[in-house]
Amino acid sequence: MNQSRSYLRFRLSYRLEHWLLVFSFTVLALTGLVQKFAQNDISIFLIGVMGGIQQVRVIHRIAATMLMLESVYHIGSIGYNLIVRRAHWDMMPRPHDLVNGINLVLYNLGLRAQRPQQGRYTAEEKVEYLSLVWGTALMIITGFMLWNPIATTSVLPGQAIPMAKAAHGGEALLAVLAVLVWHFYHVHIRSFNTSMFTGYLSEEEMEEEHPLELERIREGQTEQPMSGRVRRRRVFLTAYGILALVMLGGIYVFVSFEKTAIETVQPAATQVPRLAHVNDDGARGLMTAADDPGPLLSWDTGVGQLFAEKCTLCHGGTVPLAGLDLRNYDDALLSDTESPAIVPYNPLASGIIIQQNSVHPVQLTELEFAGVYSWIERGAPQQEESQAQ
Amino acid sequence: MLLLAGFGLIFNVHAQPPAPPPLPAEFQSTDVIEFQGEGSPDNEFCLNCHENPYLQMTLASGEVVSVTVDADAYADSVHGQHGTEGYRCIRCHDNNREYPHEEVSATNRRELSIELSTACARCHTDKFDETMDGVHLMALIDGNEEAAVCSDCHTGHEVQRLTDEDTGRPLPESSELAAQMCESCHADIYNVYANSVHGEAVLAGNSDAATCSNCHGVHSITGPTSSSEFRLFSPESCATCHADEELMAEYDISTDVFDTYVADFHGTTVTLFQRVTPGQAFNSPVCVDCHGTHNIVSADDPSSTVMKENLLGTCQQCHPDATANFSDAWLSHYQPDAEHAPLVDLVNKIYAVLIPVIIGAMILFVASDIRRRWADRNHEDL
């Protein structure tokens, strides 16, 4: 016996289908379960990573559309195999699968001496495939109802919508758990099955998993070319072409009929605050761009006017807060404050610069701040040099 | 005449005591009147002039402002009741320790109110700090001098106590007082509110019902339209009372309202906006979008926007194509139990059984399979 021989199990188109399904299922599960368990901290984190709930819903819908397109392709693939190639419908459950399943359980329990001999698709695999078909159909139907609640309630009672939501979420949880337990155990944990990557199973794996299939291949019971294939192919492709167009049209209606459940005002691109505020982290806040304080050359040229506009409501008037009176030059520099508000030539020691860099209720704009800073740096002159002379 | 006699006794008056009205020229001289007692000037010293009902000053704008103080009203106020004699005038009017007073810098009546309100900050620093986050002070700094300052709500000399001195909790009468404070500027809204389920209760003396500040906040009051955050977090404001079982039990109102909202599509979306992207603009409905805001009425009221007959119209505000059955998709704040949503309840029950049974069976099979394969391998090894 040639020990190194391997057998084709999944041709490329099957493998591509599988990976498309893996991708869409995973994305749907991830973006769906975070919505089902929306108040969970992990969900909140993931939703943040994915760009917010609106984006999560859009991603969910894109993946759902992918899955529906894949389903249309899959129906065609089955039809082609059955009608054109006249292939054996291996995936269809038959009475002997039930017998195999029962015998497998009994064998595991030690009540049978032999592991049941199975063919191309085992009872375990058929259970998973049928669950997938059933689950996908149910998710598409309930998904349609949630995506198009107005259209749905024009025919069905209103309660159909929360019912669809309950079923969509329940089925999702069931499907994800089933994949994690059933699929992962049989394909990855028990022994790592690489046929979805390579397409092939080794002779030992075939003997272990699919002995009847191996026997059939060895006996040469492979697919036989049959007469009339060209005609069948033409008829099938015409019929399927029409069916596919109908289904694709259905998907188009599905995804485009209503925007009810997705359309929300988009986040504002930029928020222009009317006032300068301090950010949460204590840094200087955003400023309105249009504020140009004009030249802040000296107290008489700009600075005094700026203080009168922005500061003297509190620092001046009846109650100069913190002892600071910014209404005139002398009081501003000599005010009876705890620490000096304005230290000529030393902005970093000046109270007003220190305050502006921390939490102060009224914040200067960037331009104003820069102007005042530079004014103090230049010695906080009352008049411009040319004026003084 | 008593007043006149009093002057001579209490004050060291350099000029002849003036007789109102009008103030004689002598009093308007440059002579300085100083308090001669111990410490700072007491209220009696100030009231000697300021009880004069004709006492006025003219501002640069030409506005004439009465500077008369109603001593009895002040004595009834929270400040007037402090200690044995109440707070002294100079606690707020600090720069008026002697006569002539410092020149008034405010050029008009409004400026004067704004200037004087800054005096409140010296004692009520925490409250003043809160106003710095508030829409009124922001508007003021933005140049709107009509924006409310302390005295516009609290008055100057007749400030009422609104919170319990010991517990710090709002006094029962504060609900009504608060609504009336807001009315002086926001009369249109007040009139709508007064006919709402909350307004009717508050104005009838029920302090359980929501007054303006319960939803809008007090000193740090934010503008409902200036940011989306007020709207975004508004369900929490409603839940403060409507999820309080003890409080709601008195009025036979369900406390499921908040949980059922969060469990539904709209509420889930809103809570996710709150926790993930709180600054973002959104149009998912919050409580007030269906129930109304200032005009909110009982859900049993025939005019209620959430009354069964009116609900579809409310849905159509956002879902204009919705038809008769659509509004039933919302379970009216009921938990989906057998009575209120039998279909939803059935599906929930099916999955509550199906998931543990199927997954449990799978786990049992996997466990038996592992055990058997383990046994087979050991057997082969032997």
Image: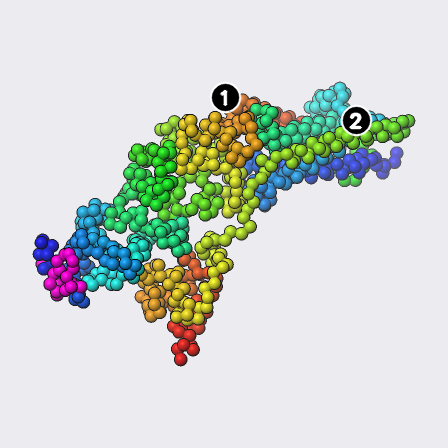
In which chain is the residue bearing label 2? A
Q: Residue furthest front?
A: B62
Q: Which residues are magenta?
A: B9-28
Q: Does the magenta-highlighted stretch encompass residue B18?
A: yes
In the displayed structure, would residue A358 be above or below residue A303? above
The quadrant the N terminus of chain B occupies is bottom left
Q: Residue at x 68, y 28 (%)?
A: A137
Graded by Cα atoms within 10 Å as few (under 14), some (14 to 19) or many (20 or more), the crowding at tag 1 reads few
For disc 2, the marked residue is A90
Residues B275 and A373: in front is A373
Residue A78, above or below B168: above
Task: Give how far across and how far down residue B246 sits, in percent.
Answer: 37, 31
Residue at 17% x, 56% y is: B49
Identify whether A96 is placed above or below A67: above
Q: In terms of depth relative to the viewer, which is nearer, A37 or A301?
A: A301
Which residue extends farthest right?
Answer: A227
Q: Which mark is residue B43?
A: none
Task: Say left or right for B220 vs A281.
Answer: left
In three-dimensional space, the C-alpha distance between marks 2 and 1, rounded to whole angstroms, equals 47 Å
Residue B339, labelled with which disc? Answer: 1
Residue A166 appears at what percent x and percent y? 57, 29
Image x and y of residue A92, in percent? 76, 24
Type of the residue with mark 2 = Asp
Tell me which chain the residue with mark 1 is part of. Answer: B
Callout 1: helix, strand or loop? loop
